């Protein structure tokens, strides 16, 4: 049962308006788990054996020139692959949706054209597409099958379409900058009008444009096309409405969401950094976690494989080649470190060369989906009533009666729609069964504030177990690739999943009577909790 701390009369007036999310941004954060799907001509590259032993043997069409691959670039396409290399023998977009839905994916971001520019639809604005290949006699259309299946399954459509990186147009066709811009915007228009509805575009930071390209004019034309043709379509992840890998503080001074003129880069990508006084709100997306990474395919270290790789030998000790991939335990940990840190997890899980999901990967996706559902979506041990809790920034904004029931996670959600991101430091306390009602002990510690500047980042101790299941390595400094063992920070945001620092389930567990959420600093008061809950871990691998 929830004991709410009633709002105190005469709360101090707000110091400054907190940046609020718009409806599309709230909808995006509610997705929580989405899927990157790298599929295209790089999927079918056959590298020479010596390349497989390099430290990071990943392939980028039209860019990987250090290794001879002329056997696949015939016909005047070098350094790009010949379109005939693209040849999925059993393409099945329904199969993609089935397995993605089993994991709980709400959106799939498909590489409609990756860095080399090879288009997965018969575009009228490029000669480098499925129409130029022998696959299905040049009549194939991956995007059509993808769109039809996604709409049938109710999965939102996102496209990686790199308008500032098209190796074919810049290195082979040798278009002028103006012609390059015309063709890129034309491809965008085709996708928006024929292959939608498009929920989001994912624009990368990599670049390969013809010499003399007016990049400002290019991005102004891109924004104009999207905002005019499909105003509901979001722009991400290095600019626009959603920003990648910016941490759990969502506010900054740019770029302005929904803007047709502010084409600037996101915080950390070229335009300042996040700040509590920021004018604009940007949800954060973590996209650097892939189903195949590390020497064994299941470690959060380089190499990172974006397209499906049934071969790799970089540091591998289990034989070469291998078909290695992440297990359910590591992916579950990745969920805790991304969704549990206020972000949306955009995990890369690509189809294999047949055009279907790898059967072993599909089994892992289903296992992860069941574990997340059983742990977080099938009832809480204790939770606030509908409507959450609001009040001053004090101890006990919300209190839960636990009655000695075991639990593993403390899950807090801020009501961002009610007032934006306001909680800037917090802790969670508990009382023991049989102890005095006011004998509160630390369950999740407060972050230590900066002694001279309370708005500066606070110092937070790690609150994850020393050896969480399944991962390995560490994030090695990759800001977009947390490994599940990260220390927490001071903000709550959309969702915060905390690990208790005392045992609350299993052998030696403390019998907990009550748990309370305490606010230590607010950007603005009152603070609003959408929910505060305790959950028991339910996974098949433990």
Image (tube, helix red, strand yellow):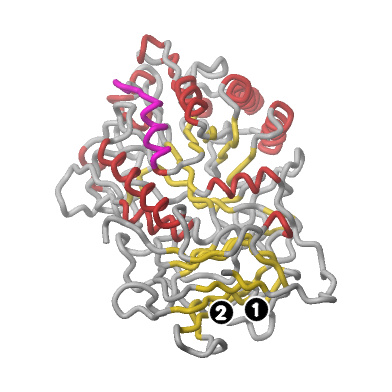
Circles 1 and 2 in contact, beta carbons < 8 Å: yes
Q: Position of residue 343 (x, y in %)?
A: 54, 55
Nearest the viewer among 209 and 187 is 187
Q: Which of the 4 quarters of the picture holds residue 45?
A: top left
Left or right? Give the position of 482 relative to 322: right
User: Foreground: 21 or 182?
Assistant: 21
Dot 2 lies on which element? Answer: loop
Disc assigned to residue 142:
none
- Give the residue drawn at x 49%, y 16%: 122
Q: What's the residue at 67%, 43% (across, down)?
A: 24
Q: Is residue 214 above or below residue 405?
A: above
Q: Is residue 312 visible?
A: yes
The front one of 355 and 500 is 500
- The vertical placement of 375 against 365, above or below, is below
Residue 93 is inside the magenta segment: yes
Query: For the C terminus, which image quadrant?
Result: bottom left
- Does the segment drawn in magenta span residue 269? no
Residue placed under numbered mark 2 in the picture: 446
Q: Main secondary structure of the magenta part?
A: helix
Residue extending farthest left: 319
According to the picture, the residue beneath numbered tag 1 turns out to be: 520
The x, y position of residue 61, in whole percent, is 41, 33
Depicted 319 relative to depicted 72: above or below: below
Task: State the residue at coordinates (61%, 26%).
Answer: 188
Q: Is residue 333 left or right of residue 534?
A: left
Residue nearest the observer in this picture, 239 or 68: 239
Query: Which of the two labelled residues, at mark 1 and mark 2, occupies the earlier sequence position?
Result: 2
Stretch in magenta: 88-102
Quadrant where the N terminus sits is bottom right
C-alpha separation, residue under disc 1 versus residue under disc 2: 8 Å
């Amino acid at each position: 049962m929830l004991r709410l701390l009633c709002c105190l009369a005469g709360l101090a007036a707000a110091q400054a308006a907190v940046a609020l999310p718009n409806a599309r941004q709230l909808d995006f954060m509610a997705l929580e788990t989405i899927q990157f799907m790298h599929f295209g001509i790089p999927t079918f590259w056959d590298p020479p054996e010596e390349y497989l032993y390099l430290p990071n043997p990943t392939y980028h069409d039209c860019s990987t020139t250090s290794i001879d691959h002329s056997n696949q670039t015939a016909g005047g396409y070098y350094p790009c692959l010949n379109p005939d290399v693209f040849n999925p023998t059993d393409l099945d977009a329904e199969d993609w949706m089935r397995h993605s839905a089993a994991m709980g994916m709400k959106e799939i971001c498909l590489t409609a054209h990756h860095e080399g520019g090879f288009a997965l639809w018969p575009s009228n604005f490029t000669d480098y597409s499925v129409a130029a290949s022998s696959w299905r006699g040049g009549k194939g259309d991956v995007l059509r099958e993808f769109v039809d299946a996604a709409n049938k399954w109710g999965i939102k459509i996102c496209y990686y379409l790199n308008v500032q990186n098209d190796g074919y147009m810049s290195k082979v066709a040798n278009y002028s900058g103006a012609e390059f811009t015309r063709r890129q915007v034309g491809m965008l228009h085709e996708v928006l009008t024929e292959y939608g509805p498009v929920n989001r575009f994912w624009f990368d930071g990599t670049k390969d444009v013809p010499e003399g390209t007016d990049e400002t004019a290019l991005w102004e034309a891109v924004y104009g096309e999207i905002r005019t043709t499909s105003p509901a379509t979001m722009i991400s992840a290095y600019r626009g409405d959603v920003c990648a890998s910016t941490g759990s503080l969502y506010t900054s001074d740019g770029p302005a969401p929904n803007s047709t003129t502010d084409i600037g880069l996101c915080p950390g990508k070229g335009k300042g950094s996040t700040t509590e006084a920021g004018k604009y709100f940007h949800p954060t997306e973590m996209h650097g976690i892939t189903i195949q990474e590390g020497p064994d395919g299941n470690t959060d270290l380089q190499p990172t494989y974006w397209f499906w790789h049934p071969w790799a030998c970089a540091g591998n000790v289990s034989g070469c080649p291998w078909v290695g991939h992440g297990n359910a335990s590591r992916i579950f940990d990745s969920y805790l470190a991304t969704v549990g840190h206020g972000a949306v997890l955009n995990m890369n899980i690509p189809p294999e060369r047949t055009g279907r999901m790898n059967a072993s990967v599909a089994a892992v996706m289903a296992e992860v989906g069941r574990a997340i559902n059983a742990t977080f979506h099938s009832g809480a041990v204790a939770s606030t009533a509908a409507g959450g809790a609001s009040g001053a920034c004090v101890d006990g904004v919300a209190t839960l009666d636990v009655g000695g029931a075991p639990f593993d996670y403390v899950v807090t959600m801020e009501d961002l729609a009610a007032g934006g991101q306001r909680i800037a430091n917090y802790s969670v306390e508990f009382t023991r069964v049989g102890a005095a009602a006011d004998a509160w002990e630390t369950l999740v510690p407060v972050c230590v504030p900066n002694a001279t500047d309370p708005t500066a980042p606070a110092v937070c101790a790690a609150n994850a177990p020393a050896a969480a299941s399944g991962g390995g390595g560490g994030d090695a400094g990759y800001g977009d690739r947390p490994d599940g063992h990260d220390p927490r920070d001071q903000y709550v945001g959309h969702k915060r999943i905390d690990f208790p620092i005392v045992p609350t389930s299993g052998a030696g567990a403390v019998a907990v009577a009550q748990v309370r959420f305490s606010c230590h600093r607010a950007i603005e008061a009152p603070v609003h909790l959408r929910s505060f809950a305790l959950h028991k871990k339910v996974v098949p691998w433990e």
